[in-house]
């Protein structure tokens, strides 16, 4: 869409900027105002364009008494507040009263023959009952003959106060800069202000920069962009500038969009970049009130395509007493709005919000989608630092034709094809109705959990949510009834915070037939679970105790599953943790299992010396760690302080033939505080040939080993044997009294050495599976 607007502007420019040779009215009596062909240059003189006694339009001084040019101003006349290739000291002012003109620029024009900068402020004001065409608050720089400059040091303002007879065209708060060769073009302004009312095609708070060659084009707003929308019926609003081309820039310091009614299809409050850069360095603030028809898309951030950048610092959005309707776009095809807190991008582009996104909806009638993050396609990035959505006194939309009421769906994150990082996401629902409430983001039309912490807050007796899920914590002021709930992670409950609810009171009621007791846990207490008819109920059972979710496991794809017997995490809490939990902190524990890619040389050396004479065969490597996640911050617990029993599923490729008895053990390499590496062999404690159960009190680098025997072989009675780094490297003893004597690994036809795998695995602390018999190639 931005590309279409840019093309229209470029085509219009071909007509407006045809070289005019004739000039008239440039004498001393007009105080510097001059006309050259169809272009009028005020050269800093404040001018008023209005109709004279003969019904034709002329240029007057701003008192309206003195005619400054005898030539008529026609519908195709371009007006400049500044000069042509000459600078202006001070301010410029153009007032157009009930007259149809061509392009209007508050600043000057430069084609590269000289600069047309303005040292003060520039203003364009259009009033009466007339359609504004294309209006730029700043100047125009076309680098055709050299480096072109039409900057405005102060504030550039484009104020459209006229009531349109049809509809206003395109309004820009900043300037216009273009280059198609090696020259530089600059139409930078200090601040920008753009205002319109009534039917308007588009409004852009910043400027436009096109760079088609090796040169650069800049249409930045150094400071703040302010946009005012009054009773509009507008198609498109862009808060920042438009940058087209890899050497184009149209950034800004901050953006503020204030709207008071009535209809709007698209709002993209940040910058707009096609290959170029249209970043907003600071905050974007949006305030929309009394809109009866927000029927398209709203983005709190920017838009970037083709590798462009439209990042922003932070976003704060308020939508109050407004409506997002459900409408029939085509026959039997009903649509409704989507509101994003972040930006929108295609592949290889960026429209991130580095800081927070805050979205507030008050007294609205809402359908469609509300997303705290941005919208990203392919590998594009529309991430946000954190998101917060607050909904108060919001209801749905009743559609007569469908005889049904539709409610909004809210997701704390955005929409993407890849993963979405977000440190914290909050959704607060107060006396409002939602169809769905997700703590995650949308991927392929389905909700997915965020990497960070997600919180749902529910207050008010009128609050209704049909389906919810993927929250770490749920804060309740009242019971919550759901048709379905989706946990953020299997086996990890959502923690309820309900300080005002009483023992015996139902905290959560859910109608899902797949409900599980472990879906919820109560902070500082415990829950009772029961099923009554088609409802699962979680009731307050105890209060006053410190409770945290049980230990969960996180196993990467391609890694053997691991199960923890005792999932109680209470013993891993410090006194400080317990105090912080009581104060509202969220603490979780997870056993994280991953492959080892690059073991350290020290670990490789230690394991090689320890296992040279063991006669074991390497099976698989693992890195196992216990992670404490406190309010989104992770820390590693390597010394458990107690024994933890874990069961490792033997990978399918390591299962033996039916005539072989395979004995597994786990070799653990752990670094002590003084740097000493200690190797421990742990023997299997279960009778299941497909699992290995061991007890550990430290987590780090492991190696699973195995030995093959006949069916009558007995498992050694010893549990483990430790060896220190200080033992004789040249005469390493077996790690167990029952270990088999040394056996060299024979050639197998594989080009990759077994010890290369051992060396690779044990440099970073992993689990290695070993055996007396060498690997055999799997029969096809």
Image (tube, rainbow, N blue to C red):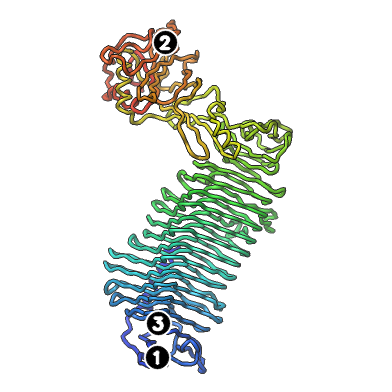
In front: label 2 or label 1: 1
Find disc 1 in the rendering and name its residue: 30
Residue 214 appears at what percent x and percent y? 28, 63
What is the number of the mark on residue 691?
none
Q: Earlier in the sequence, mark 1 or mark 3?
A: 1
**Quick one: which residue is furthest to the top in this view?**
712
Figure check: 385 above or below 705: below
Query: What SS does tag 1 mark?
Result: helix
Disc 2 from disc 1: Cα separation: 109 Å
Left or right, 129 with respect to 707, comes to: right
Which quadrant is home to the C terminus?
A: top left
Cβ atoms under marks 1 and 3 closer than 8 Å? no
Crowding at label 2, few (<14), some or many (≥20) Cα neighbours within 10 Å?
A: few
What is the number of the mark on residue 44?
3
Q: Earlier in the sequence, mark 3 or mark 2?
A: 3
Residue 776 appears at what percent x and percent y? 33, 18
Left or right, 102 with respect to 438, comes to: left
Residue 175: image quadrant is bottom left
Find disc 2 in the rendering and name its residue: 659
Residue 399 appears at what percent x and percent y? 67, 57
Left or right, 748 with respect to 418, comes to: left
Residue 617 appears at what percent x and percent y? 35, 17
The answer to which of 473 and 370 lies nearer the viewer is 473
Which residue lies at the image location 44% right of the left edge and 54% below the top edge? 351
Crowding at label 3, few (<14), some or many (≥20) Cα neighbours within 10 Å?
A: many
């Amino acid at each position: 869409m931005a590309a279409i607007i840019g093309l229209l502007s470029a085509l219009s420019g071909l007509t407006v900027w045809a070289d005019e040779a004739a000039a008239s009215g440039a004498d001393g009596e007009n105080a510097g105002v001059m006309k050259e062909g169809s272009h009028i240059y005020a050269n800093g003189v404040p001018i008023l364009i209005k109709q004279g006694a003969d019904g034709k339009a002329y240029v007057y001084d701003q008192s309206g008494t003195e005619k400054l040019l005898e030539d008529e101003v026609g519908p195709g006349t371009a007006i400049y507040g500044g000069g042509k290739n000459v600078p202006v000291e001070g301010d410029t002012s153009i007032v157009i009263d009930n007259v149809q003109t061509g392009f209007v620029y508050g600043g000057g024009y430069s084609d590269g023959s000289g600069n047309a900068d303005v040292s003060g402020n520039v203003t364009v004001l259009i009033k009466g009952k007339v359609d504004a065409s294309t209006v730029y608050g700043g100047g125009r720089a076309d680098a055709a003959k050299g480096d072109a400059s039409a900057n405005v040091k102060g504030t550039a303002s484009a104020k459209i106060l006229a009531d349109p007879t049809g509809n206003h065209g395109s309004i820009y708060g900043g300037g216009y800069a273009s280059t198609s060769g090696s020259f530089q073009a600059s139409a930078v302004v200090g601040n920008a202000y753009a205002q319109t009312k009534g039917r308007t095609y588009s409004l852009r708070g910043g400027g436009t920069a096109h760079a088609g060659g090796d040169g650069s084009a800049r249409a930045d707003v150094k400071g703040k962009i302010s946009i005012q929308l009054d009773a509009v019926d507008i198609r498109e609003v862009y808060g920042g500038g438009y940058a087209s081309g890899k050497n184009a820039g149209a950034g800004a310091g901050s953006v503020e969009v204030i709207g008071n009614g009535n209809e709007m299809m698209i709002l993209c409050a940040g910058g707009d970049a096609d290959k170029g850069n249209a970043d907003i360095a600071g905050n974007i603030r949006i305030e929309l009130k009394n809109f009866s028809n927000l029927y398209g898309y709203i983005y709190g951030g920017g838009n970037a395509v083709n590798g462009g950048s439209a990042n922003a610092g932070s976003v704060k959005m308020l939508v109050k007493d407004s409506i997002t309707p459900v409408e029939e776009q085509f026959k039997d095809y009903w649509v409704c709005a989507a509101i994003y807190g972040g930006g929108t991008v295609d592949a290889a582009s960026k429209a991130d919000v580095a800081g927070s996104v805050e979205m507030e909806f008050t007294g609205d009638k809402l359908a469609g989608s509300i997303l705290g993050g941005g919208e990203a396609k392919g590998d594009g990035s529309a991430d946000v630092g954190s998101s917060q959505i607050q909904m108060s006194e919001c209801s749905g939309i009743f559609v007569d034709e469908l005889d049904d009421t539709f409610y909004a769906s809210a997701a704390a994150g955005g929409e993407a094809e890849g993963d979405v990082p977000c440190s914290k996401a909050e959704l607060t629902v107060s006396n409002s109705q939602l169809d769905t409430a997700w703590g995650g983001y949308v991927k392929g039309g389905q909700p997915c959990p965020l990497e960070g912490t997600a919180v749902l807050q529910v207050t008010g007796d009128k609050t209704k949510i049909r389906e919810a899920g993927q929250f770490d914590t749920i804060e309740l002021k009242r019971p919550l009834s759901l048709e379905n709930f989706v946990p953020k992670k299997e086996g990890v409950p959502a923690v309820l915070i309900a300080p005002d609810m009483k023992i015996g009171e139902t905290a959560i009621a859910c109608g899902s037939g797949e409900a599980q007791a472990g879906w919820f846990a109560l902070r500082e207490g415990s829950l009772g679970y029961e099923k009554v008819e088609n409802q699962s109920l979680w009731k307050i059972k105890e209060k006053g105790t410190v409770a945290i979710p049980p230990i969960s496991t996180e196993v990467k794809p391609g890694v053997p599953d691991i199960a923890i017997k005792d999932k109680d995490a209470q013993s891993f809490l410090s006194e400080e943790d317990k105090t912080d939990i009581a104060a509202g902190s969220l603490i979780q524990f997870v056993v994280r299992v991953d492959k080892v890619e690059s073991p350290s040389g020290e670990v490789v050396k230690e394991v090689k010396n320890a296992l040279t004479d063991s006669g074991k065969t390497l099976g698989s490597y693992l890195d196992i760690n216990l992670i404490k996640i406190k309010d989104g911050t992770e820390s590693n617990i390597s010394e458990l302080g107690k024994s933890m029993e874990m069961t490792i599923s033997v990978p399918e490729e390591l299962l033996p033939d039916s005539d072989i008895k395979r004995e597994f053990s786990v070799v653990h390499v752990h670094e002590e505080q003084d740097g000493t590496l200690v190797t421990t062999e742990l023997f299997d404690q279960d009778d299941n040939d497909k699992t290995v159960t061991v007890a550990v009190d430290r987590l780090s680098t492991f190696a699973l080993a195995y030995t093959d025997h006949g069916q009558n072989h007995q498992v050694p009675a010893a549990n483990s044997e430790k060896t220190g780094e200080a033992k004789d490297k040249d005469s390493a003893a077996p790690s167990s009294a029952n270990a088999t004597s040394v056996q060299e690994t024979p050639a197998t036809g594989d080009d990759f050495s077994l010890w290369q795998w051992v060396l690779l695995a044990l440099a970073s602390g992993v689990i290695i599976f070993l055996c007396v018999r060498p690997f055999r190639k799997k029969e096809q």
